[in-house]
């Protein structure tokens, strides 16, 4: 623990065995540890004692840990609160973070996470010279966007959403196709002060360049062929709310410069008009591309990139959070069967394992489509691995996989596979990957060093 004058830690949990364990686990010189088994007693301690850090369960009596968090922050804004729960939901994580929680930990991970997180919190207490901002009040989560996942990587995204939602700073959401970037954008909006206004979405890659400017900024009657009346653009429609620019990496350079002006001073003009309009819009953008690379190649403006990338939220691909796959699959299964009025269908344990072991290059979107196909083709109420239409070789890019299959099928029956691959498969994969060694190695299922050996065998 940090060296300091005595600091006070309050443990709040109805489980007395946990209180005993945590007291011993966190004991350190200069640290005073207090204990309570319910939220009411904790508030009384906070009223009488300066508490620097609180570690509290979410499930408490006579009110829960989220309510306790709110009361602590209202009374002592500089107290850091760490919540623990067995199964944190999307809403709990976002709302707890938005309300000022220092962290949210799963009970099952406390044996190795609790001490370093508490140490970090105590160090923060020492380092800061003034109290943190008062946290926002926790809104109701009814009807809000639902993001499924319990992985640490996704929980970290929820925490960032909770922090950035309360500001008006532009947000850039990055991640592979199918990871759920639009859902995260909706969460940013729905947990923000702008939630009463509309979030307008526009896909920058789906609209031709000659129409995109009009879509964004609107146009005057007669400003171009087909402009039969004045039309308000997305910036006008989203005034007071949020504008979500999906696939911002596909926006033409000619439009990028006009977008930059809006981000700089909030002004724009309709196509065919010299009048300057003002808008109050929070920009959330998303891309599956690496925008820093796009800047380097000249396909994306550097000044616009820095304007957009005030806060970046990276959505991890599904293969980096396999613990979320069974939950997502079950969620989609229930959603699809309920929507179509189907009898209850469930996954066998083998089918769940098969889903968990798949690479999911198309991420959450691919998983949902796979579950939908399995439901449509189901011949019984229990889905087996054979009922789930997975790619034959998980983890490979579909286009690259087709080339791989063609060459393997053409190999002589008695040819050593690696020898054959060294001259044909590896070369073709590398060509199809545009020279990207990492992508080609991933498609082949080997490390980059092994791919190099295959391509250039040692004498």
Image: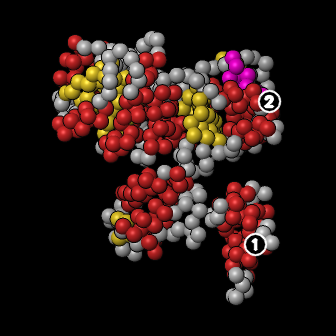
Residue at 78 percent of width and 57 percent of height: 435
Boundaries of the magenta span: 257-265
Name the dominant secondary structure of the magenta segment. Answer: helix
Foreground disc of the pair 1, 2: 1
Along the viewing direction, whichever of 355 and 456 lies nearer the viewer: 456
Residue 37 on image: x %, y %: 18, 30
Residue marked by disc 2: 223
User: Is 260 a magenta residue?
Assistant: yes
324 left or right, relative to 317? left
Q: Is residue 311 above or below residue 385?
A: above
Which quarter of the figure has residue 5? top left
Residue marked by disc 1: 422
Residue at 43 percent of width and 53 percent of height: 323
> Which mark is on residue 74?
none
Task: Determine whether label 1 and label 2 are within 8 Å by CB.
Answer: no
User: Is 320 a magenta residue?
Assistant: no
Residue 170 on image: x %, y %: 60, 27
Q: Quadrant of the N terminus?
A: top left
């Amino acid at each position: 623990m940090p060296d300091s004058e005595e600091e006070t830690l309050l443990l709040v949990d109805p489980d007395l065995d946990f209180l005993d364990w945590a007291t011993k686990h966190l004991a350190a010189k200069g640290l005073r540890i207090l204990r309570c088994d319910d939220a009411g007693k904790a508030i009384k301690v906070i009223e009488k004692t300066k508490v620097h850090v609180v570690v509290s369960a979410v499930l408490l009596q006579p009110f829960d840990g989220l309510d306790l968090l709110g009361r602590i922050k209202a009374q002592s804004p500089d107290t850091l609160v760490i919540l623990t729960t067995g199964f944190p939901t999307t809403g709990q994580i976002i709302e707890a973070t938005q309300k000022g929680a220092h962290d949210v930990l799963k009970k099952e991970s406390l044996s190795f996470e609790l001490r370093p997180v508490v140490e970090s919190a105590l160090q923060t207490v020492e380092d800061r010279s003034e109290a943190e901002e008062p946290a926002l009040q926790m809104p109701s989560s009814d009807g809000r966007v639902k993001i499924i996942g319990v992985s640490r990587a996704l929980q970290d995204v929820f925490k960032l959403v909770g922090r950035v939602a309360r500001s008006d700073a532009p947000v850039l959401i990055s991640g592979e196709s199918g990871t759920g970037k639009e859902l995260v954008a909706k969460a940013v909006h729905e947990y923000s002060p702008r939630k009463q206004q509309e979030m307008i979405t526009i896909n920058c890659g789906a609209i031709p360049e000659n129409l995109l400017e009009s879509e964004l900024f609107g146009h005057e009657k007669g400003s171009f062929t087909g402009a039969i009346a004045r039309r308000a653009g997305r910036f006008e429609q989203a005034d007071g709310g949020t504008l979500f620019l999906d696939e911002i990496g596909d926006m033409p350079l000619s439009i990028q410069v006009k977008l930059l002006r809006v981000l700089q001073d909030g002004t724009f003009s309709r196509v065919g008009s010299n009048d300057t309009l003002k808008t109050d819009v929070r920009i959330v953008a998303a891309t599956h591309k690496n925008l820093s690379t796009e800047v380097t190649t000249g396909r994306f403006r550097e000044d616009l990139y820095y304007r957009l990338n005030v806060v970046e939220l990276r959505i991890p691909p599904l293969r980096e959070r396999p613990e979320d796959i069974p939950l997502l699959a079950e969620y989609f299964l229930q959603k699809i069967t309920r929507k179509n009025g189907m009898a209850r269908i469930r996954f066998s344990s083998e089918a769940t394992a098969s889903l968990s072991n798949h690479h999911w290059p198309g991420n959450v979107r691919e998983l949902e489509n796979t579950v939908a196909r399995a439901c449509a083709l189901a011949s019984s109420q229990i889905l087996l691995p054979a009922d789930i239409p997975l790619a034959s070789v998980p983890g490979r890019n579909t286009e690259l996989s087709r080339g791989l299959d063609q060459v393997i099928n053409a190999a002589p029956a008695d040819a050593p596979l690696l020898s054959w691959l060294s001259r044909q498969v590896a070369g073709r994969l590398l060509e199809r990957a545009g020279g990207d060694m990492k992508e080609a190695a991933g498609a082949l299922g080997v490390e980059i060093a092994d791919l190099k050996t295959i391509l250039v065998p040692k004498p």
